[in-house]
Amino acid sequence: MPLRVRLTLWYGSTLSLVLIIFSVVLYSVTARSLRDEIDQALEETATAAVRSLEERGFLPLLDEDSLLSQFPELARIDKFFQIFSPSGTITIRSPNIKQHELPLSRTALDASIAGKTIFESARYPKEPPLRLISMPIMYRGSLLYIVQVGTSMKSIEDTLQRLLLVLIVTMPIALAVSLASGWFLAGRALRPVDAITLAAQRIAAGDLSQRLTVSTSPDEIGRLVHTFNDMIGRLDVSFRQIRQFSSDASHELRTPLTVMKGETELVLRRPRPLGDYQAVLESNLEEIDRMTHIVDELLFLSRADMGEVKMDALPVELESLVEDVHRQATLLGQDRQIDVELGTMMPAAVQGDELRLRELVLNLVENAIKYSHPGGKVQISLVTEGTQARLSVTDQGIGIAPEEQRRIFNRFYRTDAARGHTKKGTGLGLAICTWIAESHKGRIEVTSQPGIGSTFTVTLPLAPQAA
Ligand SMILES: Nc1ncnc2c1ncn2[C@@H]1O[C@H](COP(=O)(O)OP(=O)(O)OP(=O)(O)O)[C@@H](O)[C@H]1O
Ligand SMILES: [Mg+2]
């Protein structure tokens, strides 16, 4: 069942229930207070009559005329009057009752004998119902007379009937009007949902560049649209990245293959001295090494993506790790007259995987050497700051333009300056470093100025006991 129908039905049934309860309450409260009013008027009249009889010392009963002059309201057709003897026989009655015999009921008699006032309702065929009060007149503990005052409930009945009619007529109208407006409002509120569904269908059909433009207001729908657009945006980015990644990966693997194929074809074209074959095989081996390196790194990254790379969580002394890497790097730097030195060093213990952290530091130092000019200087330093260890690698090399500083952490991304500077490199090193840093709950940042140098800083949380 469509949401719009369900909402309207819910709304309609709740509203009907409320209307019905409201009408029942209204009707019964009105009926009740009208009856109370009548009872009160009856009681006042009866009390006045009794008092007047008592004042006259219960003298032989008044005749009708003096009775009516005493209580002018009795002459009004809506009230009548009867006085009974203790045995229940009528002794006197007001004229406006003449057409009916209205004997004293058993209950009224019993109550009067017990000295109690009692209200009763009576009904005769084809007549409006009557309301009666029977009030005893007692003298020294014994019953003298019973005064009964009655009135027709016709006006009440009429009022109640009119009220009922009004309710019966207006309730369905009110219900119909509010159902119609409920239907309209539900439709209005749900219209953006339809639009969202349509747009989502288009997007699901493969067009990830689509965005929803339904609503920009900060309400529920607006938030839904916003969240949805964010989600599509992220999907779009990651699909693009995946496509980019595969095309980059194939490209990177293709270059060494082309080189190998070209060299091999060339050397096979005619018989050559043994040394030529050897040279080609050696060059091929180099390319094979390069491809193996790429494939290894790709494999590592894809296993890391799938969460299959296991990481130790052991205490690692960063200071000695950096000193080790420094020794290794000094050798690497020697070929290109690059001086690798240690700056400020502080003891720092973190929790993690020593091999991966070594790989991280080595990658950064290798980059620093690789992208330095001959005779340049690379500095590694390690400081602690609060609960963090900060390891930085600074070089005086080619630097990175500001707009490229974020993208160098992407897989296969290499700056043009870097490509011009050295052929070596696949652009996967920093992606691996980022992954290692993040899986140690740390991060890598870069500050750099083209032509002046770069500083890569790794921030890692210190191991708890050291903090
Ligand atoms: N110290 C640095 N100075 C200048 N540019 C750098 C530096 N380190 C990294 N870069 C830039 O970031 C890019 C990505 O670095 P990354 O280490 O990921 O790849 P790579 O060094 O080119 O190849 P490899 O995967 O072999 O490490 C580099 O190609 C280079 O453009
Ligand atoms: Mg590198």
Image (cartoon, rainbow, N blue to C red):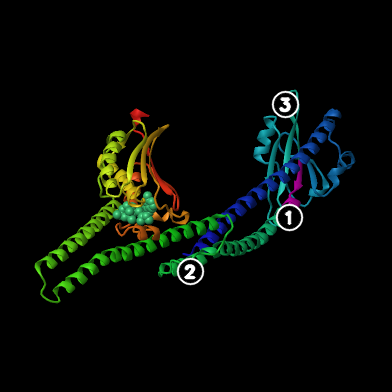
- Amino acid beneath label 2: Leu
Farthest residue, direction bottom: 270
Say whether marks 2 and 1 touch (CB < 8 Å).
no
- 189 left or right of 153 in image: left
Q: Which mark is residue 198?
A: 2
What number is the disc on residue 142? Answer: 3
> Which of disc 3 and disc 2 is earlier in sequence?
3
Determine which quarter of the picture holds residue 50: top right
Q: CA distance from mark 2 to mark 3?
A: 91 Å
Q: Can residue 48 be seen from the camera position used here?
A: yes
Of residue 413 and residue 173, the one placed in the foreground of this image is 413
Q: How many marks?
A: 3
Q: In the image, 231: left or right of 216?
A: left
Give the secondary structure at mark 1: helix
Q: Residue 41's x, y, as percent?
A: 78, 41
Q: Position of residue 62 (x, y in %)?
A: 86, 37
Q: Is residue 65 above or below residue 269?
A: above
* Residue 21 to residue 63: above or below: below
SS class, disc 2? helix
Question: Which numbered tag is attached to residue 158?
Answer: 1
Magenta-colored stretch includes residue 68:
no
Q: Residue, x 29% and y 36% (percent of image)?
A: 323
The range drawn in magenta is: 149-156
**Tag 3, which secondary structure?**
strand
